Image (cartoon, rainbow, N blue to C red):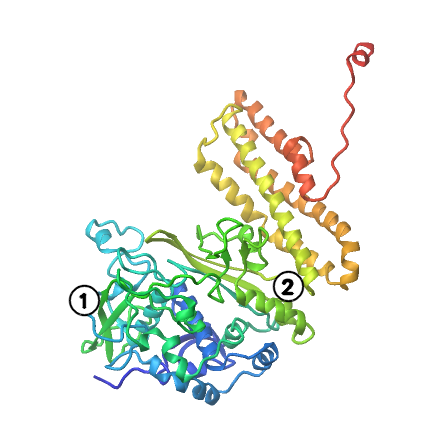
């Protein structure tokens, strides 16, 4: 066999370059100005590898404070500096051989080897293949991995590990965790570099020493087996940086010479050594008690009174502005919290706004993760949305309040829209669940169609709130009413457009035209402030209710 495969010495990171080409680079090359992003060909691997690199930077050269962070952001370390910083942890970054192996059990484990495709989260399981039910993700597409490919796929599984049956533990954040990463702004003639993407999310005060390595990288010590007599792993048991390097699965890769020059099915390269099979055993590390423990994930409480926060997971691959509030600012009091990396970036922005202003003003939020149904991955969701940062704590609080009202009003309109569409299609007496295959897309389209307007309206609010704090409260009421009127017009335009496209009056039978007219009338009344729905809508936007004509009493009507 060739020499051990060192993830410090070997070029194994596949990246996109400013030239439009791609290349393999070493760990110490990630500060190069011509590297844009990780580019493995799989979005789950891209995100997991990005998380891994953020963790490595936090451990090796993590900043002590925000001033040190800004200095590094503007003046990235050289290749030699990074090589020297990673060198003390080189033992943890060996993929093969008899020494500790990257993200693998310290000792050999017994068991029947399975195909390497089993490391892919979206690969069909054994029963699915047996029943010939792999209709959407076909089996057998990943049979061979290079050593670089194996390292990437292995890190992805350990980072995102879903439920895998009895004893097969989930990741530190549960199965298929959600990550929210800050993408800093950059001058308009270029994209942010990989270094800027990584460093924007590196936490303060999480650096480690070689003496800490065994508590940071769990594969440097015997696995904390979690069967009935085994251990649970809480933050107090390990270094806080293990949040980036959790190892819930017990795995040993089976390396072999590539005599037939087979291509890596992930990276498309020919390696001297390949991996086609691996051995796994149950009862790996069982992570418990990591409430708010990962810097890149948002958290929530099931009930406001609960003490424990849980990591947020995607419910579907569609990520829109309904979810944005919890990811970017927080929502429901303190029941939904943004990731620490987002809060830290916003904190830095308030202090460093005058330096590299575009970094803060054009920042975005990358949301990515699996939508899971227990053990089954439904889809991988990924969305890039604005990250609107206020100029002060008071401005951020007003932005949050404004966003809550915009979303609340959109929910009211979406509800009335679906009710009106149901009446237009099926009549007043239709059952509540009438043809959900039609009504669900109506709601989804409305949310998608109003997303750009939401962010434009909220950005306008942030700009108007960019004033000295002593003037904010006096201006807030007028700004809120003004923006409420703008937002109402957008809601009205899109709601009526969706209704008319879904329930076109020209195609209705004569006996059904009255249902179409009644449905549209109800929607229009709500959008102009009438009825229970309309009153709730106008109040949510701080808009004055329309005047109503006084009712005539019976004497007046008889006299008329």
Task: Identify whether 179 is placed above or below 84.
Answer: above
**For mark 2, does the 10 Å Cα neighbourhood hold few (<14), some (14 to 19), or many (20 or more) residues?**
many
Q: Give the side of residue 498 with respect to residue 6, left or right.
A: right
Identify which residue is drawn at 44% across, 33% down: 435
The residue beneath circle 2 is 389
Task: Identify whether 24 is placed above or below 160.
Answer: below
Dot 2 falls on a residue whose secondary structure is loop
Residue in the foreground of this view, choosing between 213 and 150: 213
The residue beneath circle 1 is 113
Dot 1 falls on a residue whose secondary structure is loop
Q: Residue furthest right?
A: 559
**For mark 1, does the 10 Å Cα neighbourhood hold few (<14), some (14 to 19), or many (20 or more) residues?**
some
Q: Earlier in the sequence, mark 2 or mark 1?
A: 1
Q: Give the side of residue 495 with respect to residue 560, left or right.
A: left
Where residue 280 sits: x, y (%)? 23, 66
Where residue 553 sits: x, y (%)? 78, 16
- Let me know if residue 26 appears in the view: no
- Let me know if residue 306 appears in the view: yes
């Amino acid at each position: 066999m060739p020499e051990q495969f060192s993830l410090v010495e070997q070029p194994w990171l596949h990246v996109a370059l400013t030239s439009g080409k791609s290349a393999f680079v070493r760990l110490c090359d990630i500060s190069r100005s011509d590297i844009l992003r990780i580019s493995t060909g799989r979005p789950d691997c891209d995100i997991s590898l990005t998380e891994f690199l953020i963790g490595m930077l936090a451990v090796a050269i993590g900043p002590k404070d925000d001033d040190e962070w800004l200095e590094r952001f503007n003046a990235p370390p050289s290749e030699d500096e990074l090589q020297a910083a990673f060198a003390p942890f080189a033992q943890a970054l060996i993929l093969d051989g008899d020494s500790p192996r990257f993200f693998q059990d310290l000792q050999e484990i017994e068991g029947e080897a399975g195909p390497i495709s089993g490391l892919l989260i979206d690969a069909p399981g054994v029963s699915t293949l047996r029943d010939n039910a792999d209709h959407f993700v076909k089996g057998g597409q990943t049979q061979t991995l290079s050593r670089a490919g194996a390292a990437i796929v292995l890190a992805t599984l350990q980072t995102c590990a879903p439920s895998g049956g009895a004893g097969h533990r989930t990741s530190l954040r549960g199965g298929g965790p959600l990550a929210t990463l800050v993408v800093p702004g950059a001058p308009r003639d270029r994209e942010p570099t990989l270094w800027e993407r990584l460093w924007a999310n590196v936490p303060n005060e999480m650096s480690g020493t070689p003496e800490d390595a065994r508590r940071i990288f769990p594969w440097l010590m015997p696995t904390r087996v979690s069967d009935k007599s085994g251990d649970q792993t809480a933050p107090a048991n390990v270094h806080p940086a293990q949040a980036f390097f959790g190892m819930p699965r017990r795995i040993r890769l089976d390396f072999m010479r590539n005599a037939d020059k087979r291509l890596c099915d992930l990276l498309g390269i020919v390696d001297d050594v390949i991996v086609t099979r691996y051995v796994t055993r149950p009862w790996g590390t069982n992570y418990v008690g990591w409430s708010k423990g990962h810097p890149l994930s948002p958290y929530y409480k099931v009930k406001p009174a609960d003490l424990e926060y849980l990591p947020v997971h995607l419910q579907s691959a569609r990520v829109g502005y309904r979810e944005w509030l919890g990811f970017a600012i927080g929502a429901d009091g303190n029941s939904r919290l943004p990731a620490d990396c987002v809060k830290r970036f916003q904190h830095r922005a308030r202090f460093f706004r005058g330096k590299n202003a575009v970094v803060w003003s054009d920042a975005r939020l990358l949301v990515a993760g699996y939508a899971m149904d227990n053990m089954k991955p439904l889809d991988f969701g990924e969305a890039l949305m604005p990250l609107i940062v206020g100029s002060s704590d008071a401005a951020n609080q007003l932005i949050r309040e404004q966003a809550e009202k915009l979303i609340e009003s959109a929910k009211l309109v979406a509800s009335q829209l679906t009710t009106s569409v149901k009446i237009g299609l099926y009549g007043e007496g239709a059952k509540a669940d009438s043809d959900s295959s039609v009504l669900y897309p109506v709601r989804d389209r409305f949310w998608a169609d109003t997303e750009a307007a939401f962010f434009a309206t909220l950005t306008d609010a942030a700009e108007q709130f960019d004033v000295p704090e002593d003037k904010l409260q006096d201006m807030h009421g007028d700004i809120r009413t003004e923006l409420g009127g703008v937002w109402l017009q957008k809601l009205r335009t899109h709601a009526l457009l969706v209704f008319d496209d879904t329930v076109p009056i020209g195609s209705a039978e004569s006996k059904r035209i009255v249902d179409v007219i009644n449905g549209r009338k109800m929607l229009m009344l709500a959008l102009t402030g009438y009825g229970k729905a309309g009153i709730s809508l106008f109040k949510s936007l701080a808009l004055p209710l329309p005047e109503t004509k006084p009712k005539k009493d019976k004497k007046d009507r008889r006299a008329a």
